């Protein structure tokens, strides 16, 4: 995974606002992990957000979070 593009997009399920929350490149090993991505996500509004995580341009995982 090292040196692949990493992106997290989100959709606020209450307002349908879409945002790119993280764009980065996967870095090498850190604290026992095979790879890592230092990141901070700033959500522009409260609500339930559906996040899509992309690695190397392909969907890797989806999850939902509640932002207060």
Image: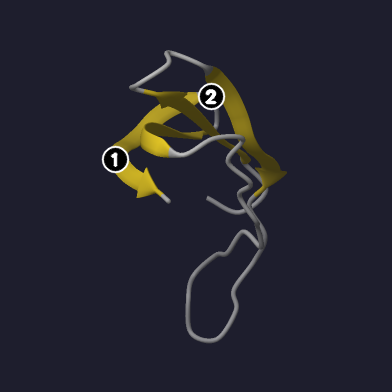
Q: Position of residue 43 (x, y in %)?
A: 58, 41
**Along the viewing direction, whichever of 4 and 20 lies nearer the viewer:** 20
Residue 43 placement, left or right of 11: right
At numbered mark 1, what does the secondary structure look like: helix, strand or loop?
Answer: strand
Q: Which mark is residue 57?
A: 2
Give the number of the mark in front: 1 or 2.
1
Label 1 CA crowd tier, 10 Å (few <14, some 14–19, many 20+): few
Residue occupying image coordinates x 42% and y 13%: 16
Residue occupying image coordinates x 63% and y 46%: 42
At numbered mark 2, what does the secondary structure look like: helix, strand or loop?
Answer: loop
Q: Position of residue 39 (x, y in %)?
A: 65, 57
Question: Which residue does the numbered mark 1 point to in the structure image?
Answer: 63
Label 2 CA crowd tier, 10 Å (few <14, some 14–19, many 20+): few
Residue 65 placement, left or right of 67: left
Q: Write down the quadrant of residue 22 in the picture.
A: top right
Q: Are marks 1 and 2 in contact (CB under 8 Å)?
A: no
Q: Position of residue 64 (x, y in %)?
A: 29, 40
| Cα–Cα gap, marks 1 and 2 | 17 Å
Q: Is residue 10 above or below residue 31?
A: above
Residue occupying image coordinates x 55% and y 65%: 35
Residue 22 placement, left or right of 31: right
**Along the viewing direction, whichever of 68 and 17 lies nearer the viewer:** 68
């Amino acid at each position: 995974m090292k040196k692949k593009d990493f992106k997290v997009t989100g959709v606020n399920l209450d307002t349908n606002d879409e945002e790119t929350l993280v764009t980065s490149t996967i870095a090498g090993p850190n604290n026992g992990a095979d790879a890592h991505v230092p990141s901070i996500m700033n959500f522009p509004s409260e609500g339930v957000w559906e996040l899509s995580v992309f690695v190397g341009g392909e969907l890797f995982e989806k999850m939902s979070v509640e932002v207060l």
